[in-house]
């Protein structure tokens, strides 16, 4: 056994290893508590359906009562408000009536958002002593997706399998050429996608429709996760787990819109929702499932953009490894040259 192997690690080394999971815990506390612990409406776009001076006054009164929680717009047609919900332009619509007001919501867009809108307008109808007729314009699938969060759980499964495998490839295949690691990553992304999608569809029937399209998007998503994990392990070593958990768990899950939509979250998480990869997969899957008339092009481009960034990181890692390999080869050559010179000098002296 070598002297190096027998040398115990210094306390500084031990503490540096302990610090990483502690920081991970702090990151998760910040992300999950910051993103989930206090959901509250923030500028929810809601239509008020009605016409005339009374409707205008009622809308202004409600806007004053809700403040920044909602942005109310008075429209004259219930069909226009319904179309806006079906296009995900608004969170709901309150239809004025002297006998039975109605509230239009969409659990397909977000169950928690629909519940929030109901809680906002239930007291309004109750205060007038009227029953509130709640209509779900785009409902979730009651069998496959009763909570409206199946896509989020699918995202979690893809992510955990993806980043764990990426780190494993980075560690176990560290001595292999980068092209070999990339090949392993592509294969692992395909297997991870097949496993998660197969379990979601065949075992739990959790994806109501468009399984092939969602699965294809999931594969591209997994490619991005693999690229980041393999590249970061080469670039930052043992801090890879911290980086991957931060990027693809802490920030990814909280900004995905799977639990709470951005309009119910603090501004930081709401802003990330518009650029983060998990949100793109979740929203694309939600549109395919419940809003098939809406496009997913923007979300697809965002996912592909993350793949491109991952590819750039892989390129940087490969160049760095090549440079290090060349430097090592030069050092070895210089050492061998010095040994030759010493042997030559001994021969001359002899």
Image: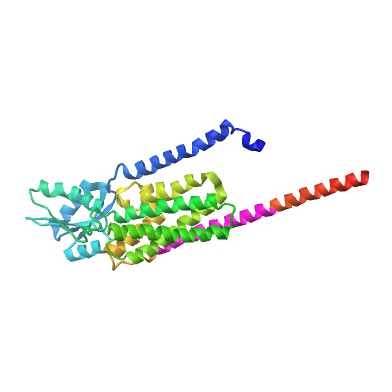
Q: Quadrant of residue 101?
A: bottom left
Q: Can the viewer see residue 168 in this picture? A: yes
Query: Furthest residue to the bottom?
Result: 293
**Which residue is at 21% across, 50% downward?**
115
- Report whether 61 appears left or right of 163: left
Q: Is residue 62 magenta?
A: no
Dominant secondary structure (helix, strand or loop) of the stretch shown in magenta: helix
- By what rule are the colours in the image chosen? rainbow
- Residue 194 appears at what percent x and percent y? 38, 61
Judged from this view, the residue extending furthest toward the front is 1
Number of marks in the rendered image: 0
Q: Where is 2 relative to 189, above or below?
A: above
- Residue 55's x, y, as percent? 15, 57
Q: Nearer the viewer, residue 17 or 85?
A: 17
Classify the position of the N terminus by image quarter: top right
Q: Residue 243: give x, y in percent of width and height.
A: 48, 47
Residue sitting at 10 percent across and 57 percent down? 97
- Residue 176 found in image quarter: bottom right
Image quadrant holding the C terminus, namely top right
Residue at the top extreme, as displayed: 11
In depth, the one of 259 and 206 nearer the eye is 206
Seen from the viewer's position, the closer of residues 216 and 80 is 216
Between 114 and 316, which is closer to the camera in this rendering? 316
The answer to whether 276 appears left or right of 288 in the picture is right
Residue sitting at x 14%, y 60%: 52
Judge left or right: residue 108 versus residue 318. left
- Find the magenta span and give its range: 300-326
Q: Position of residue 95 (x, y in %)?
A: 15, 58
Q: Would you say residue 273 is visible in this rendering?
A: no
Tell whether position 313 is magenta: yes
């Amino acid at each position: 056994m070598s002297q190096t192997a027998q040398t115990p690690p210094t306390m500084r080394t031990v503490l540096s290893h302990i610090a990483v999971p502690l920081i991970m815990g702090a990151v998760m506390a910040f992300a999950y508590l910051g993103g989930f612990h206090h959901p509250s409406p923030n500028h929810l776009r809601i239509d008020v359906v009605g016409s005339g001076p009374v409707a205008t006054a009622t809308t202004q009164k409600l806007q004053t009562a809700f403040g920044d929680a909602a942005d109310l717009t008075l429209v004259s047609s219930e069909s226009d408000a319904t179309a806006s919900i079906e296009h995900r332009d608004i969170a709901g619509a309150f239809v004025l009536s002297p006998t039975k007001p109605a509230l239009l919501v969409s659990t397909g867009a977000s169950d928690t958002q629909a519940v929030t809108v109901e809680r906002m307008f239930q007291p309004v109808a109750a205060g007038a002593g009227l029953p509130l007729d709640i209509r779900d314009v785009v409902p979730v699938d009651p069998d496959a997706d009763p909570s409206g969060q199946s896509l989020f759980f699918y995202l979690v499964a893809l992510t955990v399998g993806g980043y764990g495998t990426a780190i494993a490839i980075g560690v176990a295949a560290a001595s292999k050429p980068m092209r070999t690691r990339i090949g392993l990553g592509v294969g692992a992304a395909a297997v991870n996608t097949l496993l998660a999608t197969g379990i979601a569809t065949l075992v739990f029937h959790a994806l109501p429709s468009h399984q092939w399209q969602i699965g294809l998007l999931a594969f591209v998503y997994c490619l991005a996760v693999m690229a980041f994990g393999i590249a970061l392990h080469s670039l930052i070593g043992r801090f890879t787990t911290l980086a991957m958990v931060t990027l693809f768990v802490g920030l990814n899950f909280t900004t995905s819109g799977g639990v709470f939509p951005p309009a119910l979250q603090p501004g930081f998480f709401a802003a990330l929702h518009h650029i983060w990869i998990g949100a793109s997969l979740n929203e694309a899957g939600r549109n395919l499932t419940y809003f098939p008339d809406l496009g997913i092009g923007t979300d697809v481009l965002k996912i592909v953009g993350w793949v491109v960034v991952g590819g750039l990181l892989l390129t940087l890692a490969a160049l760095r490894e090549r440079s290090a390999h060349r430097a090592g080869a030069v050092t070895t050559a210089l050492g061998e040259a010095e040994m030759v010179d010493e042997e030559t000098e001994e021969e001359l002296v002899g």
